């Protein structure tokens, strides 16, 4: 946010927000904006780490979900509804992602042997190789964002974020 390092602008922003919602605590405004800033910064760092692989964050998450299902013994393929549910995106968005990954030869679709009206998605050898090659680099990059915190601070942050997340989910 434009005011994170400018106390005068920060105060004006808080006054503006309070003019819209007088009961909001100034600290809540600061936290909301700081969490958004940090979230976007980590997202962009992650996106940059995937540029050399030619993947978007969304594509990478789909490939990783399939890789996880394959490697952890879950099974080697998932249907698009399962993937969209696990990723928290709409089925339409997932269909587009899958189509792009399929066009790039990273995933393949097969009819479900138990229900011929459905199909399942699995990694191709090229998709598996791409995930294997870039996962370590990407995860190291993202992990580096948190290296400024001690192990105890990371645990505290994790607990606090879960607490806020639970509250936010309960307000839906």
Image (cartoon, grey):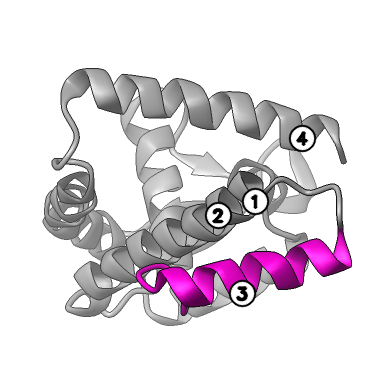
Q: CA distance from mark 1 to mark 2?
A: 6 Å
Q: CA distance from mark 2 to mark 3?
A: 12 Å
Residue 169 badge: 4
* 53 on left or right of 6: left
Q: CA distance from mark 4 to mark 3?
A: 30 Å
Q: CA distance from mark 1 to mark 4?
A: 22 Å
| Residue highlighted by disc 2 | 30
| Residue highlighted by disc 3 | 12
Q: Is residue 1 visible?
A: no
Quadrant assignment, res 50:
bottom left
Q: Position of residue 157 (x, y in %)?
A: 39, 29
- Which of discs 1 and 2 lies nearer the camera? The answer is 1
Helix or strand or loop: what does disc 2 sit on? helix
Would you call the spot at circle 1 few (<14 residues within 10 Å), some (14-19), or many (20 or more)? some
Helix or strand or loop: what does disc 3 sit on? helix
Residue 26 badge: 1
Q: Position of residue 127 (x, y in %)?
A: 30, 61
């Amino acid at each position: 946010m434009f005011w994170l390092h400018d106390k005068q602008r920060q105060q004006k922003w808080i006054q503006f927000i309070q003019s819209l919602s007088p009961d909001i605590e100034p600290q809540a405004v600061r936290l909301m904006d700081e969490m958004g800033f940090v979230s976007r910064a980590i997202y962009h760092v992650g996106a940059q780490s995937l540029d050399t692989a030619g993947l978007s964050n969304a594509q990478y998450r789909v490939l990783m979900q399939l890789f996880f299902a394959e490697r952890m013994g879950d099974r080697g393929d998932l249907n698009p509804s399962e993937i969209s549910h696990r990723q928290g995106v709409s089925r339409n968005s997932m269909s587009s992602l899958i189509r792009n990954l399929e066009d790039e030869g990273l995933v393949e679709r097969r009819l479900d042997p138990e229900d011929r009206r459905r199909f399942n998605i699995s990694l191709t050898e090229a998709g598996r190789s791409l995930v294997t090659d870039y996962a370590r680099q990407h995860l190291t990059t993202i992990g580096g964002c948190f290296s400024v915190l001690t192990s105890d601070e990371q645990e505290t942050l994790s607990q606090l974020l879960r607490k806020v997340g639970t509250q936010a989910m309960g307000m839906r």
